[in-house]
Image (cartoon, grey):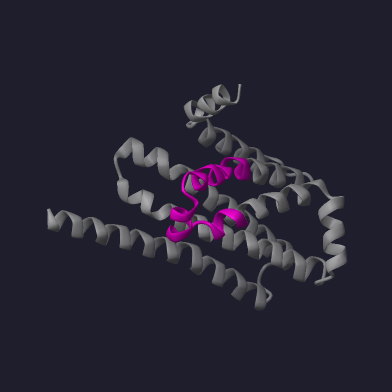
Amino acid sequence: MFHQRFSSKNKTLLLKVVIHLGAFIPLIYMYYLAIGDQLGGDPVEAIIHFTGIGAFNLLLITLLITPLTKRFKLKMLMNTRRLLGLYAFTYAMLHILNFLFFEVQFNLSLFVEEIFDRAYITVGMLAALCLLALAVTSFSRVKRTMGKSWQTLHNLIYLIVLLVAIHFYWSVKSEIIEPLIYIVITVFLLSLRHHKFKRWFRRAR
């Protein structure tokens, strides 16, 4: 029994190390390429896209954890959701900061104007604010303090991925194939929770 528990802890630790490396190293490498002017003709667009799509990928992986756990009985995966969520938040914040620093040159008034004038930025910022709420309440002590309301708040993850999918689709000018693929993946992952959504709908009626 002790050996099994110890082995499970080791596997969880190893998985978390893989997540750290998989999320952190590409980020550092992209900024290294950006500093060295090795990101092509539009490095600003490249780094903004990379951090944005990275945040989206991590959110989708986070949504995938529960179905995988139920299907393959891999309980250790559940211990990685918070880490994945925090990395998604980190990428999302870098996505916004990149836009603030490089696209609008830290002009706060212009930044605010862009948020209200461009629908895709409005939707993206709404998703980011919701993600911020999840990030600051993701820790065990806060979870215990909030009680049942914690789960209610963290159900916002479903709204967030929808908003991010819309943000991505609206942000592109011509190549819509990639955002459409992401929309399909998002809808599929949400459809796996259709029983939960049906229960919510019944309670709301």
Q: Residue at x 42, y 45 (%)?
A: 65
List the single residue furthest toward the bottom: 36
Q: Main secondary structure of the magenta part?
A: helix
Q: Is 114 placed above or below 28 here?
A: above
In the rendered image, is residue 48 in sight?
yes
Which quadrant: the C terminus?
top right
Q: Is 38 placed above or below 147 here?
A: below
Q: Nearer the viewer, residue 60 or 33?
A: 60
Task: Give the quarter of the image for residue 89.
Answer: bottom right
Q: Residue at x 31, y 51 (%)?
A: 76
Q: Position of residue 85 (x, y in %)?
A: 51, 55
Q: Residue at x 60, y 75 (%)?
A: 32
Q: Is residue 70 left or right of residue 169?
A: left
Does the segment drawn in magenta span residue 139?
Answer: yes
Q: Is residue 32 left or right of residue 44?
A: left
Q: Position of residue 90 (x, y in %)?
A: 58, 63
Q: Is 187 placed above or below 133 here?
A: above
Which region is colored magenta? Answer: 132-161
Q: Position of residue 80 (x, y in %)?
A: 40, 55
Does the segment drawn in magenta span residue 185?
Answer: no
Q: How many marks?
A: 0
Q: Nearer the viewer, residue 42 or 164?
A: 164
Task: Give the quarter of the image for residue 83.
Answer: bottom left
Q: Position of residue 28 (x, y in %)?
A: 55, 72
In the rendered image, is residue 46 in sight?
no
